Image (tube, rainbow, N blue to C red):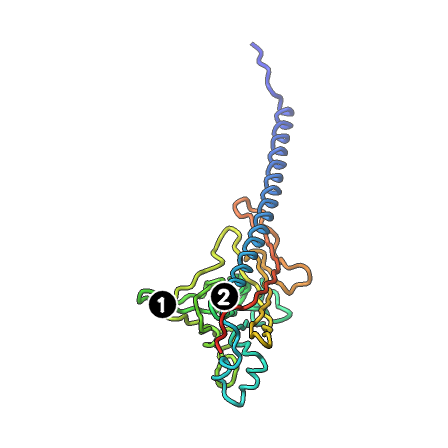
C-alpha cells in the first residue's frame, strides 16, 4: 500500500515557515512588553512624584515658621551675620555633591548629587540619590549617606535607604551636620552620617518596587518670609527616575545611558521626570 507524506522540500519549507512565525511572535511579544514596561515606569514616576509633592507640602504647611534669629543664635558672633543673611538656610536644607566617581565607567563633566537632608520643622527628610544607589557606578558605595537609630534597644545602621521621613520637630538631622560655631558643614560628601532622635524609626517613602525609583536631585530654594506675619514660603524641585538605565541628569538630552534589556526575563525601562513643589508654613512661630 502506497502512503502519501511530505517530501524533504515540503518539510524544509514548513520548518522555515514555523521558525519565521515563532521569531515574529517573539519580536511582537518583546515590543509589547517593552511598551507596557515603559508605560508602567512612567506612570509609577508620575504617581510617586505627585505623592511626594503632597508629602512635602503637608509637612511644610504644618511646620513652625522659619526663625532666623533662633537658628543662628548658636553661631559664633563672627559668623552670625553670614547665617542671618543666609536665613539660616543650612539648618533647613543641604545636599552633598561629588565628582569623584564615574557613571558606567564614564567620567562625569560636573559634580553630581549624592545625598541630602531637608528639615521642615516638623518632619525631616534624608535621601541617597540614584547615582550612589546604583552599585554599577564606580565609587557609589563610598558616597552613600548612613543613618543610625535605636529601636527597642537595638542599634541599627544602614546606607541603602532612598528617601526617609522622620519626625524631627527641632531639625536635628540638619543641625548635626552644621558646625554651629562657624556656620559650615561638618562632613564631606563621603562621610555623611545622620543620627535620628532616640526612639524615632524612619519611614521609607521610596520602597523597592517593580519601578525601582530613586531621587537624583532635590533642590530647595531659600524660603521667603513675610515682613509682617513672619510666615515662610518654600519652593523646590526634585528629579525622580528609575535606577535602571544608568541615568545621568546632566547629560545633553540622552539621560538614559543604557538601553532597555531584550532579555525575556528582565524587561527594564529607563524613565525620568522633574517635579516642582511649593507651600507656605502656617504654624506658630518658634521665635
Farthest residue in the top direction? 1
Along the line of sight, the residue nearer the viewer: 9 or 105: 105
Q: Is residue 143 visible?
A: no
Q: Which residue is found at the position 68% from the left and 63% from the top?
A: 252
Q: Is residue 146 above or below residue 54?
A: below
Farthest residue in the right direction? 252
Q: Position of residue 183 (x, y in %)?
A: 52, 82
What separation in Å lies between label 1 and label 2 (alpha carbons)?
A: 22 Å
Q: Earlier in the sequence, mark 1 or mark 2?
A: 2
Q: Position of residue 84 (x, y in %)?
A: 56, 82
Farthest residue in the front direction? 228
The mark closer to the camera, 1 or 2, is 2
- Secondary structure at badge 1 equals loop
Any mark on residue 62, and which? 2
Q: Position of residue 229 (x, y in %)?
A: 56, 74
Q: Quadrant of residue 256?
A: bottom right
Q: Which residue is found at the position 43% from the left and 66% from the top?
A: 167
Q: Residues within 10 Å of mark 2 (few under 14, many from 20)?
A: some
Along the line of sight, the residue nearer the viewer: 252 or 258: 252
Q: Is residue 158 visible?
A: yes
Farthest residue in the left direction? 153
- Secondary structure at badge 2 equals loop
Q: Residues within 10 Å of mark 1 (few under 14, many from 20)?
A: few
Q: Is residue 150 above or below residue 23?
A: below
Report which residue position mark 1 lands on: 199
Q: Quadrant of residue 273?
A: bottom right
Q: Which residue is found at the position 59% from the left and 54% from the top?
A: 270
Amino acid at each position: 500500500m502506497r502512503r502519501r507524506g511530505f517530501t524533504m522540500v515540503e518539510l524544509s519549507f514548513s520548518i522555515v515557515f514555523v521558525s519565521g512565525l515563532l521569531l515574529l511572535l517573539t519580536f511582537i511579544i518583546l515590543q509589547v512588553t517593552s511598551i507596557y514596561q515603559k508605560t508602567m515606569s512612567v506612570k509609577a514616576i508620575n504617581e510617586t512624584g505627585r505623592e511626594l509633592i503632597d508629602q512635602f507640602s503637608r509637612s511644610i504647611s504644618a511646620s513652625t515658621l522659619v526663625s532666623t534669629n533662633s537658628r543662628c543664635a548658636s553661631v559664633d558672633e563672627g559668623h552670625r551675620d553670614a547665617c542671618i543673611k543666609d536665613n539660616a538656610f543650612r539648618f533647613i536644607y543641604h545636599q552633598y555633591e561629588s565628582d569623584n566617581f564615574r557613571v558606567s565607567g564614564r567620567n562625569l563633566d560636573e559634580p553630581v548629587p549624592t545625598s541630602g537632608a531637608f528639615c521642615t520643622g516638623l518632619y525631616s527628610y534624608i535621601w541617597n540619590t540614584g547615582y550612589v544607589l546604583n552599585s554599577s557606578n564606580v565609587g557609589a558605595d563610598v558616597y552613600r549617606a548612613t543613618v543610625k537609630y535605636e529601636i527597642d534597644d537595638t542599634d541599627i545602621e544602614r546606607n541603602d535607604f532612598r528617601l526617609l521621613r522622620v519626625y524631627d520637630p527641632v531639625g536635628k538631622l540638619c543641625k548635626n551636620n552644621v558646625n554651629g560655631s562657624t556656620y559650615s558643614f561638618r562632613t564631606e560628601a563621603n562621610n555623611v552620617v545622620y543620627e535620628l532622635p532616640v526612639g524615632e524609626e524612619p519611614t521609607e517613602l521610596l520602597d523597592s518596587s517593580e519601578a525601582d525609583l530613586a531621587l537624583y536631585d532635590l533642590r530647595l530654594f531659600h524660603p521667603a518670609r513675610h515682613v509682617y506675619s513672619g510666615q515662610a514660603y518654600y519652593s523646590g524641585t526634585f528629579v525622580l527616575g528609575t535606577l535602571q538605565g544608568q541615568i545621568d541628569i546632566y547629560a545633553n538630552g540622552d539621560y538614559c545611558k543604557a538601553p532597555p534589556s531584550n532579555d525575556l526575563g528582565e524587561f527594564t525601562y529607563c524613565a525620568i521626570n522633574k517635579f516642582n513643589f511649593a507651600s507656605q508654613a502656617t504654624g506658630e512661630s518658634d521665635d
